[in-house]
Structure formats: structure tokens, C-alpha cells
Image (tube, rainbow, N blue to C red):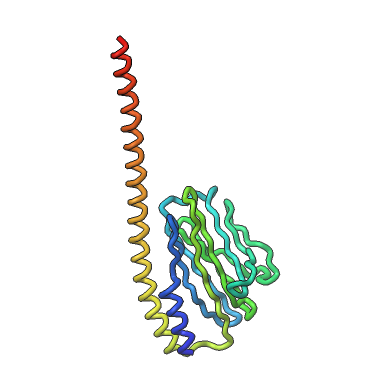
């Protein structure tokens, strides 16, 4: 039991967030749930751009192992699309809110066969790079002792909170640098165009 708790903390500290060019996706990479209960798979993101539902893309996929085929079961294409899937048989519920950059989902009546890897992949144009977060869902048949769970939750929450602050700062810095770069390019283009205009004016004066 203690091993499982600390394994979860290891996932939290090493893979809680995936950094992209203009997209950061945050997940809880190790989730343990009791057979027959509901499991919320939390996935949120930070982006330099506002979300436009007409252009936003989201894929949720499942695989039994890291090298196994990926089964697409939830998408966002102008609206939430929950695919008819024999494995989950109507047990998937959308729990996200795009206004809050939240694309989470909930799987009800968790079964032992649901154990595996869940990948949350997000693309928010005009950003050109997608971000993703990988969650491993473990399904157990008995509850972990409360003391071990409490320790894991307390330490995990501390690590997760610290990482969230760091990631938010990185996103802000990245967006500010991107904006400055765009402004600088606009200024250079404007200066170049003014130079061409002056050159043409001087040639006309010389012709006279």
C-alpha cells in the first residue's frame, strides 16, 4: 500500500505537466480508484491564445499499455463528441469547461478492465503545437489505508501546487516574449517600408 502511494507521488513530481511551444497541459498522471466507483480524469491547459470553439481540437484516447494501440473515445470538434465505445458502454461523462481551460472527463462504474493509460491531447489554434498529458488509471478492489492515502494526498498536493505556480509563470513569460517578438517584427517591417518610400521619393527629386 505504501509503495502504491509513493509510486503515485513519483508520477506527480515527474510527469504532472507537459511543456509545449505555446501549450501546457496539466494532469494528475497517477489515479487510483476503487472498482465500481467513478473516476474523474482531470486535464487542464494554459495557452497564449484565447479558446475559439470553432478551431479548438481535443482528443482523449485509451490504451492498455504504453505500446498498445490507442482507442479514441472522446473528441471536441465544435462540440463534445463521446464515441460509442464497447469498452466504456455509455459510462463516459464530459466534466470539462472550455471557458476555464478544463477538458476533464469522468468514467462511471469503473471496472478492472478500465485500467490503463489515458491520453489528453489539446490543440488551440493559432498555436501550431499540441500539448498532451498522460494519465495512468489503476483500479483496485480494496481501499488503501487512510493514513497512507492522507500522506500521499498532502505531499502530492504540495508538489502539484508548486508545479502549477511554476508552470503559470513560465506560460506568462513565454506569452510576453512572443508578443514582444511580434511587435519587434512589426516595427522592423514598418521601418523597412518607410525606407523604401523615402528611397522612391529621393529618386523622383533627382529626376527633376
Which quarter of the picture shows residue 105?
bottom right
Reply above or below: 191 against 108: above
Residue at 32%, 28% (x, y): give it. Answer: 194
Which quarter of the picture shows residue 191?
top left
Task: Using the image as rendered, state which of residue 189 and residue 130 is in the foreground.
Answer: 189
Task: Using the image as rendered, state which of residue 174 and residue 135 is in the foreground.
Answer: 174
Q: Furthest-top residue in view?
A: 208
Q: Position of residue 133 (x, y in %)?
A: 50, 66
Q: Position of residue 193 (x, y in %)?
A: 35, 29
Which quarter of the picture shows residue 69?
bottom right
* Location of the C terminus (image quadrant): top left
Residue at 57%, 60% (x, y): give it. Answer: 59
Residue at 36%, 71% (x, y): give it. Answer: 161
Task: Using the image as rendered, state which of residue 89 and residue 137 is in the foreground.
Answer: 137
* Number of marks in picture: 0
Q: Position of residue 57 (x, y in %)?
A: 55, 54
Q: Furthest-right residue in view?
A: 86
**Is 132 on the left or on the right of 108, as rendered?**
left
Q: Position of residue 1 (x, y in %)?
A: 49, 89
Reply above or below: 140 against 200: below
Residue at 46%, 84% (x, y): give it. Answer: 5
Reply above or below: 12 against 76: below
Amino acid at each position: 500500500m505504501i509503495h502504491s502511494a509513493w509510486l503515485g507521488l513519483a508520477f506527480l513530481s515527474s510527469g504532472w505537466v507537459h511543456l509545449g511551444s505555446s501549450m501546457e497541459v496539466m494532469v494528475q498522471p497517477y489515479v487510483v480508484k476503487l472498482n465500481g466507483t467513478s473516476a474523474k480524469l482531470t486535464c487542464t491547459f494554459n495557452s497564449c491564445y484565447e479558446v475559439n470553439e470553432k478551431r479548438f481540437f481535443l482528443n482523449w484516447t485509451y490504451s492498455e499499455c504504453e505500446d498498445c494501440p490507442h482507442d479514441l473515445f472522446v473528441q471536441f470538434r465544435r462540440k463534445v463528441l463521446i464515441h460509442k465505445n464497447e469498452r466504456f458502454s455509455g459510462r463516459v461523462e464530459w466534466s470539462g469547461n472550455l471557458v476555464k481551460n478544463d477538458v476533464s472527463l469522468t468514467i462511471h462504474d469503473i471496472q478492472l478492465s478500465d485500467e490503463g493509460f489515458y491520453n489528453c491531447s489539446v490543440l488551440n489554434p493559432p498555436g501550431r503545437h499540441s500539448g498532451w498529458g498522460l494519465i495512468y488509471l489503476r483500479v483496485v478492489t480494496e481501499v488503501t489505508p487512510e493514513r497512507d492515502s492522507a500522506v500521499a494526498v498532502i505531499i502530492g498536493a504540495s508538489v502539484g501546487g508548486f508545479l502549477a505556480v511554476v508552470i503559470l509563470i513560465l506560460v506568462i513569460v513565454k506569452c510576453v516574449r512572443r508578443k514582444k517578438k511580434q511587435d519587434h517584427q512589426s516595427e522592423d517591417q514598418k521601418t523597412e517600408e518607410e525606407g523604401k518610400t523615402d528611397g522612391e521619393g529621393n529618386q523622383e527629386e533627382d529626376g527633376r
